[in-house]
Each structure stands twice: as C-alpha cells, then as structure tokens.
Image (spheres, helix red, strand yellow):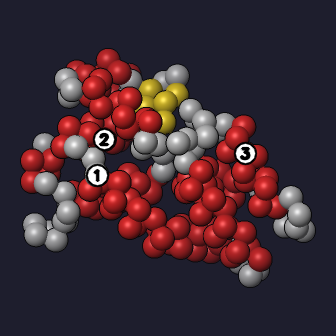
C-alpha cells in the first residue's frame, strides 16, 4: 500500500509532520526531502526514515553527519525488507525494475524517461509487471514516468545483481539481462 503516487504527496507530508508535532524539534526542508527520498510513498519506510531522523536529531546530530547517519541506520534496517521484496518478485518483475533503473541512469535523453512507451521498448513485458510493482509499492508513478519508491532500493538492487557469483540471491537470468 502506498500513500501517494509521488514522493511529494500530502499523506506523506502528514506522516512526517506527525513525528514533530508534539515536540520541540523541527525538520528543515533538506531533512524532509531525505525522509521522502528514503521512504517514498511507502508508509512503513517513511515511518522508519522519520524515526531515525527524529531519534538522531534528538541526540543532537546535525548537518551532513545527521543525514549520513540516517541513511546508514535506514539501510541497515531496510536491507532485509529489500531482500524479501526482491526474492518475491518474478523474473519478469526484476527485469522491469532493472529497466526502470537503467532509464533513470540515462535520464538526460527523452528516450530514457522510464515511461510506459520507453519501458516496453526496452522490455516488452514491462506493461504486464507495472501494475503489480506499483500495487506492492516498489514503483511510484509521476506524470513523467515510473521510479523506484526509495533511492536506497535502487542502490540495493544494483549491489545485489553485481554481487560475486554465489553470494547473491538473484537468479542468473536477471544478472545476464
């Protein structure tokens, strides 16, 4: 279940505000953006990112050190969840996710925007996978196309498929693709 179809959704912002409403802490725009980048529209991951930001900020961390620590704490907790998500994707869904990542890496060209037309051009079965990936919260949809719900999920997937043979969980056919 996702809260919104974009990282800037009102429900996502309301959840973030809930963390600071009854406290003396405030989140600056850069900190709010970090929560949205890590959690996207996924309530569980938004809550996790918000918790780590709130907790570390309460401990008087600030600036780049705070943001780096939040990313590190988030990733250490999210890793097993990302693994579970990945393990429960079909081969086709994994390839569709890789196609979205590939297009995101080349987004300077209009042909590289991860919209339906471009994804189907790159992987003809993508249109079949998109509804399930959106429904499970892996992908979010904006006017410009599709993107992974968390910036760290992309990093995790890339590390997973580039792992030393035998140490990864992903099937070989996805790695070859």
Task: Give the residue displayed 52% in from the left and 22% down from the top.
Answer: 143
Q: Nearer the viewer, residue 123 or 91?
A: 91
First in sequence: mark 2 or mark 3? 3
Alpha-carbon distance for marks 1 and 3? 29 Å
Tell me, yes or no, whether the two marked residues, 2 and 3, touch with CB atoms within 8 Å: no
Q: Which residue is mark 1?
A: 88
Q: Nearer the viewer, mark 1 or mark 3?
A: 1
Disc 3 on helix, strand or loop?
Answer: helix
> Can you see residue 11?
yes
Q: Nearer the viewer, residue 167 or 90?
A: 90
Q: Which residue is mark 2?
A: 97
Mark 2 → mark 3, Cα distance in angstroms: 26 Å
Q: Quadrant of the C terminus?
A: top left
Residue drawn at x 72%, y 69% as measured from the top left? 54
Is there a contact, CB below 8 Å, between mark 1 and mark 2? no
Q: Position of residue 172 (x, y in %)?
A: 9, 54
Which residue in the structure is indicated by mark 3? 13
Quick one: 82 or 8, which is closer to the camera? 82
Instruction: Answer left or right for 151 relative to 120.
Output: right
Q: Is residue 10 left or right of residue 67?
A: right
Query: Which numbered disc flags the more N-terminal residue, 1 or 3?
Result: 3
Residue at left offset 9%, top offset 47%: 173
SS for dot 1 = loop
How far is mark 1 from mark 2, CA to CA?
A: 13 Å
């Amino acid at each position: 279940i996702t809260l919104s179809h974009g990282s800037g959704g009102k429900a996502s912002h309301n959840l973030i505000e809930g963390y600071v409403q009854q406290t003396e802490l405030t989140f600056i725009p850069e900190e709010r953006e970090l929560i949205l980048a890590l959690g996207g529209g996924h309530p569980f991951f938004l809550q996790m990112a918000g918790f780590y930001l709130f907790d570390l900020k309460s401990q008087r961390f600030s600036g780049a050190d705070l943001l780096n620590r939040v990313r590190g704490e988030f990733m250490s907790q999210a890793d097993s969840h990302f693994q579970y998500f990945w393990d429960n994707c079909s081969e086709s869904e994994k390839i569709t996710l890789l196609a979205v990542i590939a297009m995101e890496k080349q987004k300077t060209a209009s042909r590289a925007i991860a919209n339906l037309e471009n994804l189907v051009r790159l992987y003809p079965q993508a249109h079949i996978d998109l509804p399930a990936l959106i429904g499970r919260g892996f992908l979010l949809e904006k006017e410009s196309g599709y993107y992974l719900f968390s910036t760290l999920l992309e990093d995790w997937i890339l590390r997973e498929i580039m792992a030393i043979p035998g140490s990864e969980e992903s099937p070989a056919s996805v790695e070859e693709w």
